[in-house]
Image: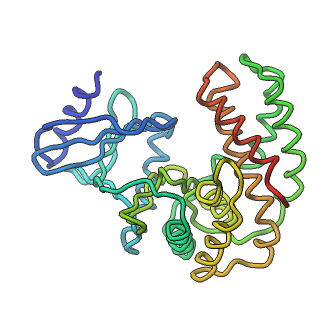
Amino acid sequence: MNPEALIKSVLTAYPLGDLESFAALKHGFANENYKIITEKGAFLFRICRLLSPEDVEKEHRMLAVLKQNHFPAAYPIADKTGLTIRKADGLPVSIYEFMEGEIPVLIPETVSEVAAVLAMLHTTGIEQIPEKQNIIRPEGAESLIREFPHATHPIPDIFAQFEEQWEHVKPYLNRKLPTGLIHGDVFPDNTLFVGNKLKAIIDFEEFCIDTFLFDIAMCINGFCFKDNRLDEDLLKYFLTAYNNIRPMEDIEKELLRYYIRWTALGMASWHLRYHLIFKPYARQEKRVRELLERVEKINI
């Protein structure tokens, strides 16, 4: 089914009126997004290409908790029966509030904004949050390395570099750390800013219950690197703003740079598994090489 037909078909289940126009938005690796205009206004139409309906349902349950806490995010809209997830062409689809905003410039003000809101997220109670594993975890990196000899798209230099860097970071990932609700992917293109003010964090499909340090380090990878190098000044602004809301424990401070390395390596593992070890994909290979170079340059 072409996008227009699919959107029109799904809209019949919603109290949003007829489709007037639609436009494709950024095409990530996991979702297909469209801005749609109906008789009732502008909305985001999302087709989830990697997540299962069960994981999308968990995401929406988690978002309901954040909505109760007035957390700045974009929330799914219910259809005429109260459901926020439907299936189309065998894939889960949802319609969200459409929020205007821009990807931020990386400056002290925007870095401080996102750090403070991330710390707010980490203070959320998890009693009503569904259990969900992090898609990026140490055992996944181990199993990926075991797949390298069987890859249908072998890239020997990348495989060797990944394995070497994994051996360096692995010993630091077994310490007990504070855990709770994390976003898992707070990068600039998953935030909406108006000027230097954060309006919303979006795209919570990688949410899970895991260590806060993973989320902190992943967000630092997104907001504190320039020209693929860690900007120490931006890092200071980030940590100051974060600690003003949720003071990090000593063990988190001790392991921070190891986790910055691990999260960069974890992103590379995601690209390799989906689906670079199986077939050529120039965009993914470029990103993996960039991430592996980044890991090597992070000073401990």
Front-lying residue, 167 or 295: 295
Q: Quadrant of the C terminus?
A: bottom right
Whether residue 299 can be seen here: yes
Above-or-below relation of 142 to 299: above
Residue 104 point in image, percent of width and height: 46, 57
Q: Is residue 264 left or right of residue 83?
A: right
Give me the residue at 14% from left, 44% from top.
38
Q: Is residue 116 left or right of residue 237?
A: left
Residue 84 point in image, percent of width and height: 31, 50
Q: Is residue 195 left or right of residue 122?
A: left
Front-lying residue, 71 or 217: 217
Q: Is residue 169 left or right of residue 191?
A: right
Give me the residue at 64% from left, 19% from top.
280
Q: How is the image coloured?
A: rainbow
Front-lying residue, 151 or 230: 230
Give me the residue at 40% from left, 35% from top.
32
Give me the residue at 28% from left, 27% from top.
3
Residue 145 point in image, percent of width and height: 81, 34
Front-lying residue, 98 or 274: 98
Above-or-below relation of 282 to 254: above
Q: Quadrant of the N terminus?
A: top left
Residue 166 point in image, percent of width and height: 84, 44
